């Protein structure tokens, strides 16, 4: 049976179609692009991205070690920036996107990181670093969701727990669980073992005590074919994706479960180490996760696909009906 509760049909949209959510917009007048020259092994530096941006009328801000990115972004907004972009990893993208969301400004994702998960699921061509600059000029815009973990916004996911030892257990050998483990390995950032008191109740009312993995994502990840493993078919479903993998599975319930919900609240007795968009953080109890629907204006280059890999599959459906892995 499918893992993710309910059912959303996902059609292959054309980027310029109003049905897809994308719409052409005018060029920005005072755009600012923040660049981490060290991200992705120096992708932006090798491409000469700062000079290329400047030639297009985009003000580049090249980060130096130790600088406060959020403070720089807020300073740019105070100086009149009308669009904010980030060329770097997903953690840096999240910082700039949070400020853009708070001020109602459009956000541009330039895929200069190592994995570029958000760019992939947004429909940005991850191998077209320079072409992504067109998002400030010949652009399409739409609204997407943001995740919220105790007031901290995230583009991709927040993770708690470990998964490495779990795959060694005989009970984790079915194909569906390997899929979850592979997905976790591909999308989890830094995380730590859960505290002794962590208890998660899933959508069927089953308890998961101290799960090896708790992954809360901004929209659910694909765990089943024909969708592309570890991608999100949508970024505007208005739902969190929640997945747990048990360290000591209950034979009656299966070794893990995934479902969707607009929020997840957890009571724990101590601060929790977690990974938020690949950045290590500490969450103070209680833990409150929620989706912020259509909270971020995003722009992409008009020539980029505008759909994630999963949504490009004709007739692909994101399963949301319950069930244990088979």
Image (cartoon, rainbow, N blue to C red):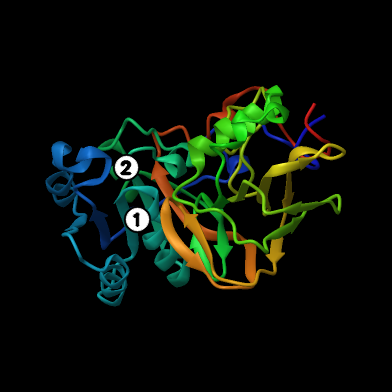
Q: Tell me whether the residue at label 2 lies in contact with that at label 1, contact meaning CB atoms closer than 8 angstroms.
A: yes
Q: Which residue is mark 1?
A: 92
Percent coordinates x, y for residue 52 in the rendering: 16, 44
Percent coordinates x, y for residue 225 in the rendering: 67, 23
Query: Measured along the vertical axis of the image, is residue 293 above or below residue 51?
Result: below
Q: Which residue is mark 2?
A: 113
Is residue 16 visible in the rendered image? The answer is no
User: How many neighbours does mark 2 have within 10 angstroms: few (below 14), some (14-19), or many (20 or more)?
Assistant: many
Res 104 label = none
Percent coordinates x, y for residue 51 in the rendering: 12, 47
Instruction: State the separation of the CA atoms marked 2 and 1.
Output: 9 Å
Query: Measured along the vertical axis of the image, is residue 221 above or below residue 75?
Result: above
Tell me the residue at 48%/55% (across/down).
Answer: 275
Query: Measured along the vertical axis of the image, is residue 124 above or below residue 28?
Result: above
Percent coordinates x, y for residue 13 in the rendering: 59, 33
> In the displayed structure, does residue 52 sit left or right of residue 6?
left
Depth check: give the residue in front, 74 or 148.
148
Q: Secondary structure at mark 1?
A: helix
Tell me the residue at 37%/61% (across/down).
Answer: 96
Q: For the N terminus, which image quadrant?
A: top right
> In the displayed structure, does residue 124 sit left or right of residue 167?
left
Q: Secondary structure at mark 2?
A: loop
């Amino acid at each position: 049976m499918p893992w993710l509760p309910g059912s959303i049909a996902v059609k292959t949209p054309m980027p310029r179609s109003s049905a897809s959510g994308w719409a052409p917009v005018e060029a920005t007048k005072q755009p600012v692009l923040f660049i981490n020259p060290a991200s992705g092994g120096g992708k932006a530096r090798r491409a000469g991205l700062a000079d290329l941006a400047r030639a297009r009328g985009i003000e580049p801000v090249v980060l130096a070690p130790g600088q406060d990115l959020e403070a720089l972004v807020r300073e740019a907004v105070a100086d009149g920036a009308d669009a904010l972009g980030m060329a770097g990893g997903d953690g840096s993208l999240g910082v700039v996107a949070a400020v853009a969301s708070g001020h109602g400004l459009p956000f541009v994702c330039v895929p200069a990181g190592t994995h570029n998960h958000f760019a992939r699921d947004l429909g940005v061509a991850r191998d077209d670093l320079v072409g992504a600059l067109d998002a400030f000029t010949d652009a399409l815009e739409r609204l997407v969701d943001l995740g919220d973990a105790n007031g901290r916004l995230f583009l991709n996911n927040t993770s708690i727990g470990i998964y490495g030892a779990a795959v060694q257990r005989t009970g984790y050998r079915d194909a569906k669980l390997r899929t979850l483990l592979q997905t976790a390995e591909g999308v989890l950032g830094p995380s730590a073992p859960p505290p002794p008191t962590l208890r998660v109740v899933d959508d069927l009312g089953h308890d998961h005590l101290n799960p090896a993995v708790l992954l809360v994502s901004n929209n659910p990840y694909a765990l089943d074919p024909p969708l592309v493993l570890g991608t999100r078919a949508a970024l505007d479903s208005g739902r969190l994706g929640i997945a747990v993998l048990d360290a000591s599975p209950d034979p009656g319930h299966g070794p893990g479960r995934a479902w969707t919900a607009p929020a997840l609240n957890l009571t724990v007795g101590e601060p929790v180490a977690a990974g938020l968009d690949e950045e290590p953080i500490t969450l103070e109890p209680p833990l409150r996760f929620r989706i912020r629907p259509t909270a971020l204006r995003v722009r992409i280059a008009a020539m980029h696909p505008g759909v994630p890999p999963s949504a490009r599959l004709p007739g692909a459906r994101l399963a949301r009906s319950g069930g244990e892995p088979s």
